[in-house]
Amino acid sequence: MDPSNNSALHPLSPAAEVARVLGNRLRAAIKGRDEVINLILTALFADGHVLLEDYPGSGKTTLAKALGESINDPNGAHIAAFRRVQFTPDLLPSDITGVSIFDPPTGRFEFRPGPIFAHVLLADEINRTSPKVQSAMLESMAEKQVTVDNVTYPLDQLFFVIATQNPRDLAGTYPLPVAQLDRFLFKINMDYIDRESEVEVLNTRRERRSAPTERLVGRDEVIVARQLIEQYVYVHPLINHCLVDTARNLRSHKKVLQGLSTRSLVLMIPALQSMAMLAGRDFVSPEDIHYLAPYVFGHRLVIAPGAGEMKKVVHECLAGPLEQLTRMTLAGQTPVPAPPADPFPLAPVN
Amino acid sequence: MTSRNSIWWKLPGVVIWMAAVGLLAAGYTSKLGVLFALSGVVSAFALATWLEGFSLRLSRVWLCSGLAMGLTVLLSSFLRGNSGVVGLFGSETIYGFTESTNWFMGVLCWLVPVLLSAKRYSLFLTLEAASLVGIFSSILAAHRDGSIHRPFFLTDWLLERNYDPMPFFLGAGALLGIMLVVWMLSRSSAKRTLLDPALLIAMIVALFLFLPDGKLRQLSAFAGGEGGKGDQSKKDKQHHGGQGGKGDQKQDQDNQGQNQDPDPSNGEGRRSFPVAVVSLHDDYKPPYGTFYFRQDTLSNYNGRRLVRDASGKLDTDVGMPFPAEPIEVPLRDRADLPSAGSRERVAHRLRTTVALMTPHSKPFGLIDVAKLEPAPNPDAKRFERAYKVESIVLDADFGTLLNRSLGSEKWTPEMWQHYTEVPEDPRYREITEKAKLLLPTHLRGIPIAQALAVKFWMDKNTTYNLKVPKLDEDADPVANFLFGDRNGYCVHLAHSAVYLFRTLGVPARVSLGYAVGSRQRGDGSTILIRNGDAHAWPEVYVRGLGWVVLDITPEKVVTPPQEEKVDQDLQRMLGEMARQTPGSPKEENPPAGDGDLRKALAEALRGLSQAMVPVLLLTLAALYLMKIWRRMEPRFCGPARLPVASYRATLDGLADLGFYRDYGTSREAFAKRLAERAPDLSDLTALHMRAALGPGVPPVGRAKYLALSAAIARQAGQGIQWWRRALGVLHPLSWWKVS
């Protein structure tokens, strides 16, 4: 049921409240990007990072900044709410992680944390920097820690990265390999916003600069929301079957050169849970899979040249398992299906 | 997607199409043709699969197919019509080549565009299924036309092992039907909710209409009904030679539909079926190697061609009615009488029984018929009627003819004139003069030797070919043939021979009936006459012997007159059936009794056809019961089942209105699609999905579910025409595709 209906009772209602506040704040700051906002919140609650592929000036900094500024951490004064790093070819790993500096009065090396010590980090044009920096960055994203001079410094539990890259203008870039793209939960391709939203952006440019009306969200609230979602959004075993079957279809697809890793399926589960919570459900529905699959799977696949759109391939492989999952819901007790050898009773689609 | 675009998915389609095309082709073409038709199916599927990858315009595909087919037809007709090419490669090669090309290209040019179109538009899917249904029904229909059990190679194998072939065929047919239905239903496409049941019903009706019933009778008997026996007079029998030449053309045209004889000009397309069984009461081998059964004769030259003598005074040896009591046929010369000529026995009397399987207007008998007697019909289900014939059959061969003179002593000059009248065309004389040169000089003066010379000349210089243009009603069958390419069939040959004989002054006429090679008889005493045995042949009148067959047998044959060998078992079986006297008690436990088998078959078939209606009704009732149960279930089911039951009932209701969830889309997406029409659907969907995939059944009462269901039905039905809604309610299978 919709957890917001009886908010006092449902265990998910704190999470829903956090989502509502963050959503309102972000929507107030950015117009016409509701889908991206939804996906970014999903990634935030699923403890994943986001790679935005878009052109300059599409509002990604505003978005990341609004998100970072919406999170308030009364205890962590040393951690910035939001940092932005412009990735350039001459950037060094220490420029983002921080360096140990010799302090003459104490005679010791003191660690000066870099911009990575933030709640929300915007890594702009991540493909413009050298692989050395990329790997340092991506490692810290995965491990949530930074190691400088053999000393490991943990990052904040909330640590959330929004990286961007420009799909065009690729000269002099270091494209991220698939293995590194794997660190991102979502890769979102943004398009230009629709006409009305664009007009509204221009109309509301002054109001948006003033402080939003919604309250700030505490860092701990977000952490708690993550735990609540993981615990209380139900994932039916059939959902897992559907995911595995989809992955198998993708691996055996003629036009897919490299299929999905098991890790990507594991990462998919929290994303689905967050998505379900944002949709006001306490269970994962096939709709969530259908919606999230291109964002989660798309950048983890290598498809043959000329195979067309990634999204099409993913949906093609998804259709069969999803249809089976959907049909199982009419079977009554929704038993867990036997592994389908060949879905003969399913009809072909063109 | 390996699962749905793989070749395995196409396999049922390939199998069904191969079965259909194979069965269709088997009735019309040679083994080679069938083989190529089958390979055409496989190639068509392969080609269609390959072409799917390209975004071709369907209109162009259809156009190209039509062009290719047209070119193929043109090419084959050119090859067949061109005597030079035929001569170069041999008629058999050309026939095989054109047959296989035609069938291969025909199948290819039809299937590829249909398959490609069906992939895109559901309408063509229906077309594809409809063509399949048409093929199967036509095969079933063809099976009724008197063939007891085909294909012979299979039934023989079964019968030899004492199995009844009919259940086997019915089983195979049912299996194919089920496969067809499953295949049709499993192919999802929107907007097919109404076409599906229509096709299914059409198929069931076709099955019901064409299912062979217990009588195993010919198609003509069905066309003419049981009254076929009654109005024999109207069913004027037509033979090759009777191509409108009998003077009663109007009647002929009336009877086109019941014409059992193959039209020789397109004889390749017809099936062979038995028309009569003749049992010999004594062993006999005709000296000229063929049993001739005369039914009618043409002797009157009307200025263009030979027609039946209308005066009734001539040709008295034909034209008797079916005997109700013994009829003596007035013969002018009795070959069996010792006074006829030399002391050597030249002829003897032979008794035969003829059992007709198709309606005939007049009796026929082994030549020369001397006496007709009635006989009881041995099996009214199988035979039209039966009669006994006493014939005077020749023992002497051509050698004895030379000593004899021509014509009867009793003939008047008018009769001589009648039997020797011939067109005034010097070209006939030229040919006879040419033919005479074949004779040794001492024989050149003997008219009968001259006639034989003409026969030999024609044997050498004509070609038997069924593939010549059909003769017009009134056309002269001779001039174009004899002074043209000399390609023709028995009508041309017989008429030409008679004209040439008459030119020589030899009294001659054309007789019509059946000719069966004595080899066809095998060892038995039964002769099975099939429709393809119909024949026309020339006869000359030899003093003391009467009308003697002097048939032309061309050395060159383009299309053999009867390709199929007669089935000896069938012949024997029919012969035994014909010999049975009606009402006689059957033997106890006859070993593999054909009669019993046949009876069992008939019983089984009758039972089956009678069971069809209740089975159909029961199936329909079961479908409706299922539909009603699914709709009513939410009112009775337990709380755990409630979300599923009510959601399914709602979906069924939407299906009645033609709203189906598309393949591969989620329930939420379906609800969203219908959000404007039925906004409550998303609520019900949410409830259902939570019950199915959520942590527990939502705490919502039955009343809420029923209310939502009712609201959705009401909302969805708005603005839909009443007849559309009524159709949906009546549709017994609307719930079939709900998922």
Image (tube, rainbow, N blue to C red):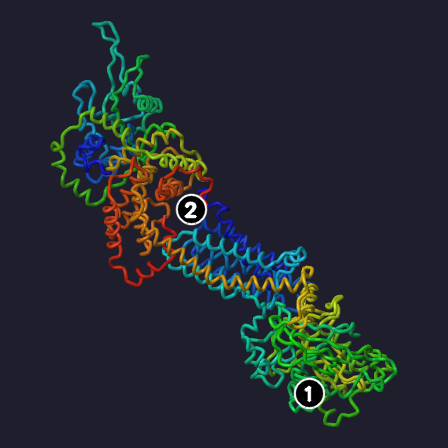
Q: Amino acid at mark 1?
A: Pro
Q: Which mark is residue A346?
A: 2
Out of A208 and B24, give the one closest to the viewer: B24
Is residue B261 among what the camera can see?
no
Label 2 in the same subunit as label 1: no
| Chain letter behind tag 2 | A
Instruction: Please tell me whether residue A238 is drawn above or below residue A107 in the rendered image.
Output: below
Quadrant where the N terminus of chain B lies? top left
| Chain letter behind tag 1 | B
Instruction: Please tell me whether residue A107 is drawn above or below residue B595 in the rendered image.
Output: above
Q: How many marks?
A: 2
Query: Residue B483: where, in percent of width, then height?
Result: 69, 79
Element marked by disc 1: loop
Out of A17 and B457, give the one closest to the viewer: A17
Q: Amino acid at mark 2?
A: Leu
Query: Residue B627: where, in percent of width, then height?
Result: 36, 54
* Residue highlighted by disc 1: B423
Element marked by disc 2: loop
Horizontally, residue B328 falls left or right of residue B102, namely: right
Query: Residue A227: where, in percent of width, then height?
Result: 26, 26
